[in-house]
Image (cartoon, rainbow, N blue to C red):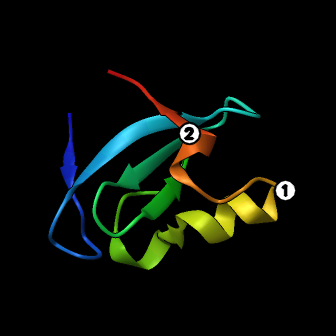
Amino acid sequence: MRTWCPRCNQGWVFEGRINATNEPVSVCEECEATWVEGKPIVFETFVDMSTMLKAKGLSGTWSDLHFVE
């Protein structure tokens, strides 16, 4: 089930995984708000996608992720 983004209110939040670690994440298609596994998808718990990925030593771009159908 998809969730409407509580941060930007302009896009859907999709379920995906980080390629390098296979860690599950949820990412807004519009504003790149990201939620790691175990965090509720609410405004107060998002992190910026590029910031989170760069902290893991990755490029911080969409190419670091793959999405689950």
**Which residue position is annotated with label 1?**
57
SS class of the residue under badge 2? strand
Can you give x and y, in whole percent of width and height, for residue 45 in the image? Answer: 48, 71
Q: Position of residue 13 (x, y in %)?
A: 29, 51
Q: Is residue 58 above or below residue 1?
A: below
Of all residues shown, which one is farthest toward the right? 57
Q: How many marks?
A: 2
Q: Is residue 65 left or right of residue 40?
A: right
- Image position of 3 (left or right of 25): left
The percent position of residue 44, horizontal first and vertical second, equals: 42, 78
Number of the label disc, if any, that sits on residue 22: none
Q: CA distance from mark 1 to mark 2?
A: 13 Å
Question: Under tag 1, what secondary structure?
Answer: loop
Quadrant of the frame with the N terminus: top left
- Residue at 66%, 32% in the rendered image: 19
Q: Is residue 64 left or right of residue 39?
A: right
Q: What is the crowding at mark 2: few (fewer than 14 residues within 10 Å), some, or many (at least 20)?
A: many
Q: Is residue 50 above or below residue 1?
A: below
Which residue type carries mark 2? Answer: Leu
Q: Residue at x 40, y 24 (%)?
A: 68
> Please, what is the three-letter code of the amino acid marked with disc 1?
Gly
**Disc ID at residue 65:** 2
Is the residue 40 above or below the residue 8 in the image?
Answer: above
- Dot placed on the residue nearer the N-terminal end, 1 or 2: 1
Residue 37 pos. (x, y %): 56, 45
The residue located at (41%, 57%) in the rendering is: 40
* Residue plotted at (68% across, 29% down): 22
Quadrant (top left/top right/bottom left/bottom right) for the C terminus: top left
Label 1 neighbour load within 10 Å: few <14, some 14-19, many 20+: few
Q: Nearer the viewer, residue 20 or 24?
A: 20
- Which sits in the foreground, 65 or 5? 65
